[in-house]
Amino acid sequence: DRRNAVIFVGFQAEGTLGREIVEGTKWINVFGEDIIVKASIHTINGFSAHADQAGILKWISKIDNLKKVFLVHGELESQKVFKEVLKKKLNLDAHIVGFKEKITL
């Protein structure tokens, strides 16, 4: 649906479905199902898979007028802990994004 967007956070490795989509493929195959890519595709760069909790917290604390954080990477237990840290230290709401979950912004 053209009204939707897929937002990739960070680097998509060569040979991955994410990379194909970012590079503009019009058709993908997911679990044996052919799908036409109609959504707009965006990439947010500048994230590091190597940052620790303290580094991410410091980075987030510098963003003005931030209303909500969407956690999309990491083990579920780590995400739960970080969600609480964001609330406690920065008074920020965070949402752990589930598999296939759609977010309306």
Image (spheres, helix red, strand yellow):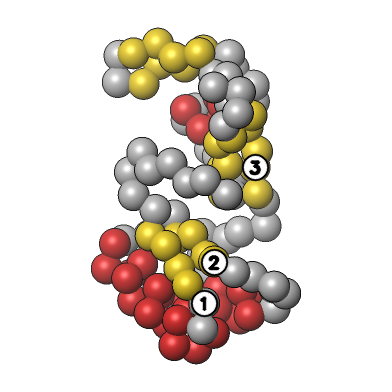
The reply to whether dot 2 and dot 1 touch (C-beta < 8 Å) is: yes
Residue 35 visible in the picture: yes
What amino acid type is highlighted by mark number 2?
A: Lys
Q: Residue 64 location in percent, x, y? A: 72, 74
Label drawn at residue 55: none
**Which of the marked residues, 2 or 1, is nearer the chain's N terminus?**
2
The number of numbered discs placed on residues in the rendered structure image is 3
**Which of the marked residues, 2 or 3, is nearer the chain's N terminus?**
3
Would you identify the image quadrant in which residue 31 lies?
Answer: top left
- Give the residue furthest to the right: 64
Disc 3 designates what residue?
43
Label drawn at residue 92: 1
Would you identify the image quadrant in which residue 41 lies?
Answer: top right
Q: Residue 56 location in percent, x, y? A: 55, 73
Residue 14 visible in the picture: no
Tag in front: 3 or 1: 1
Q: Residue 70 location in percent, x, y? A: 49, 59
What amino acid type is highlighted by mark number 3?
A: Thr
Tag in front: 2 or 3: 2
Would you identify the image quadrant in which residue 59 lies?
Answer: bottom right
> Marks 3 and 1, Cα distance to the nearest angstrom?
24 Å
Crowd around label 2: few <14 · some 14–19 · many ≥20 (10 Å): few
Name the residue rendered at 61%, 59% in the picture.
47
What amino acid type is highlighted by mark number 1?
A: Leu
Vertical order, 57 against 42 (above or below): below
Name the residue rendered at 51%, 33% in the picture.
18
Vertical order, 57 against 2 (above or below): below
Name the residue rendered at 52%, 65% in the picture.
69
Crowd around label 3: few <14 · some 14–19 · many ≥20 (10 Å): few
Disc 2 designates what residue?
68
The reply to whether dot 3 and dot 1 touch (C-beta < 8 Å) is: no
Q: Secondary structure at mark 3?
A: strand
